[in-house]
Each structure stands twice: as structure tokens, then as C-alpha cells.
Image: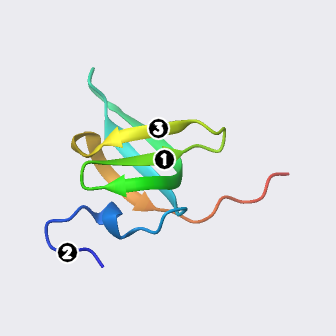
Amino acid sequence: MVRVGEPVWMAWPLGSRVTIRRRLAEGGYADTVGRLEAADADHVEVRHRSGQLRRVEAGQIAIAHLIEAAPPPG
């Protein structure tokens, strides 16, 4: 359960599949999709299926959602 004023990602279980739309410094947006590795009020860390870990600062997050598990490869 999220407390009033807490970011929504604080209630997500680690390991959940998420998508984060982040604001880019040069303008525009980019999406980060993967497994939630860490989350606090200041940032989230998402691991892409390639193994890359991306840290996204809370101030960059425009939209954040839980998503369904990826289909199996093949």
C-alpha cells in the first residue's frame, strides 16, 4: 500500500516487471522496461533483459507502470 505523498513504485514488489517513461535532459522521453531491482523515494533501478541495470532518478520519471511478465522466448 502506498502512503499519501509516496511514489507509486514504493509499493511494487522487487522483481516485478515494470516500464518507466523518463524525461531526457535534451528533451523528449525514453522508456526503460525490465525487472525492478531497487526502489526508494529518490529513484528506481530496473534491470533490462540484456542484463543492463539502469538507475532512474525520481525527478526524471514521467510515468511508471507495472506490466505483465514477458512471453517466453521462441
How many numbered discs?
3
Residue 17 percent location from the top left of the image: 54, 59
Tag 3 and tag 1, C-beta contact below 8 Å: yes
**Label 2 vs 3, first from the N-terminus:** 2
Helix, strand or loop for disc 3: strand
Q: Which residue is mark 3?
A: 54
For the residues labelled 3 and 1, the Cα–Cα distance comes to 5 Å
Helix, strand or loop for disc 2: loop
Judged left or right of residue 66, residue 24 is left
Q: Nearer the viewer, residue 62 or 43?
A: 43
| Residue under the point 58% across and 36% down | 52
| Residue under the point 46% across and 52% down | 19
Judged left or right of residue 57, residue 3 is left
For the residues labelled 1 and 2, the Cα–Cα distance comes to 22 Å
**Label 1 vs 2, first from the N-terminus:** 2
Q: Which residue is mark 1?
A: 46
| Residue under the point 47% across and 38% down | 54
Q: Residues within 10 Å of mark 2 (few under 14, many from 20)?
A: few
| In the depicted structure, whether residue 43 falls above or below residue 12 | above
Judged left or right of residue 48, residue 72 is right
Judged left or right of residue 60, residue 34 is right
> Residue placed farthest to the right in the image?
74
Residue 67 percent location from the top left of the image: 51, 63
**Label 3 vs 1, first from the N-terminus:** 1
Amino acid type at circle 2 is: Arg
Residue 1 percent location from the top left of the image: 30, 79
Amino acid type at circle 3 is: Arg
Q: Residues within 10 Å of mark 1 (few under 14, many from 20)?
A: many
Residue 5 percent location from the top left of the image: 14, 66
Q: Which residue is mark 2?
A: 3
Q: Residues within 10 Å of mark 3 (few under 14, many from 20)?
A: some
Amino acid type at circle 1 is: Val
